[in-house]
């Protein structure tokens, strides 16, 4: 099929959140504030876990990995808005755009796997407490984290390589505030059947559904075990240890399902911007808040660090 209005694209123009020049400054300040809160909140959580020996447990080890994902993902996705405002240049090279897609997809897949590993950790802690420390030792936790990071990258590389072979686009304007897979597929006049099939099978069924299934099964066993606890205090304490993780899981899977579990021909890019902004900006802020405000260990560690820093030398 001929595409008379297509050409070989050497660079992309990132349209941003809004086309109205008057709100560019407001957008920049809002995104900058979001990024600083994300970076500061997750970095504080990282430092707190590293400095406090009482937080050197599997759950907080995986939480540190989650914070690293949040910081990296926010930097990757929000950098275009910040740099374009400061430099006045909203163009990106094709290679940089594809690398941004690779980083975002790798981090998203890795985050889902890390959350699945955290659910397994909660399952072992609640359902098999006598063998918890023996099974969830440092070596196993490091191995699980490495698998999450490697698999997230490996699953995304075929998409990156296929995008590099795209030969033409109907436009070079990316209707988004960063290079995402959906707007790029929307613009392309190349054959996208392989990517459509790959995203459906590997992206949805393997990268998303398998971690979701692992998380779901873990929580089925957790809930069954909690219901068997006779005392109300014991049930409340057991559920409290996994409530923060469950909240993050529900929020992340809900936004990803709304955003990506549709054929790219049916995607409304304007509405996707708002969902992406919540997914890549609001959620990384909420993660440290959820784990801090709903976690007695984190709050106690923060108070200990504050008292220690205020002690006279």
Image (cartoon, rainbow, N blue to C red):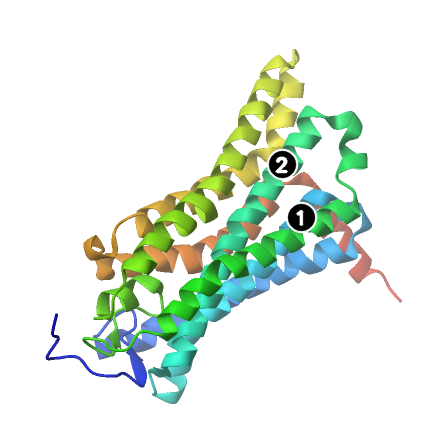
The residue that appears at 33% across and 71% down in the rendered structure is: 27
Marks 2 and 1 sit apart, C-alpha to C-alpha, by: 10 Å
Can residue 82 be seen?
A: no
Q: Residue lying furthest right in this view?
A: 313
Residue 120's tag is: 2
Instruction: Give the quadrant of the C terminus.
Output: bottom right
Instruction: Give the quadrant of the N terminus.
Output: bottom left
Q: Is residue 234 above or below residue 208?
A: above
Q: Nearer the viewer, mark 2 or mark 1?
A: 1
Of residues 300 and 145, the one nearer the viewer is 145
The residue that appears at 41% across and 80% down in the rendered structure is: 95
Of residues 203 and 297, the one nearer the viewer is 203
The residue that mark 1 highlights is 144
Q: Position of residue 187 (x, y in %)?
A: 23, 70
Q: Position of residue 276 (x, y in %)?
A: 35, 58
Can residue 103 be seen?
A: yes
The residue that appears at 23% across and 76% down in the rendered structure is: 169
């Amino acid at each position: 099929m001929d595409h008379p209005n297509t050409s070989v694209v050497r660079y992309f123009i990132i349209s941003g959140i809004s086309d109205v020049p008057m709100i560019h400054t407001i957008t920049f300040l809002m995104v900058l504030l979001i990024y600083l809160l994300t970076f500061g909140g997750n970095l504080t959580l990282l430092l707190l876990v590293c400095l406090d020996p009482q937080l050197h447990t599997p759950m907080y080890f995986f939480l540190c990995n989650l914070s690293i994902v949040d910081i990296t993902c926010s930097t990757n996705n929000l950098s275009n808005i910040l740099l374009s405002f400061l430099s006045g240049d909203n163009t990106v090279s094709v290679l940089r755009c594809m690398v941004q897609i690779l980083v975002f997809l790798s981090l998203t897949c890795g985050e889902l796997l890390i959350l699945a590993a955290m659910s397994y950790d909660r399952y072992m802690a609640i359902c098999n407490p006598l063998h918890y420390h023996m099974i969830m030792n440092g070596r196993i936790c490091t191995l699980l984290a490495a698998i999450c990071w490697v698999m997230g990258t490996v699953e995304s590389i075929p998409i990156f390589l296929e995008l590099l072979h795209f030969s033409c686009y109907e436009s070079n304007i990316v209707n988004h505030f960063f290079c995402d897979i959906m707007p790029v597929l929307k613009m392309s006049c190349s054959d996208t059947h392989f990517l459509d099939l790959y995203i459906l099978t590997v992206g949805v069924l393997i990268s998303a559904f398998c971690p979701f299934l692992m998380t779901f099964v873990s929580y089925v066993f957790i809930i069954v075990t909690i219901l068997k606890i006779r005392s109300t205090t014991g049930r409340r304490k057991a559920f409290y240890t996994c409530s923060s993780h469950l909240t993050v899981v529900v929020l992340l899977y809900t936004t990803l399902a709304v955003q990506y579990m549709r054929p790219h021909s049916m995607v409304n890019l304007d509405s996707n911007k708002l969902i992406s902004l919540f997914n890549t900006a609001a959620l990384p802020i909420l993660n440290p808040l959820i784990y801090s405000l709903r976690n007695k260990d984190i709050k106690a560690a923060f108070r200990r660090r504050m008292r220690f820093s205020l002690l006279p030398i």
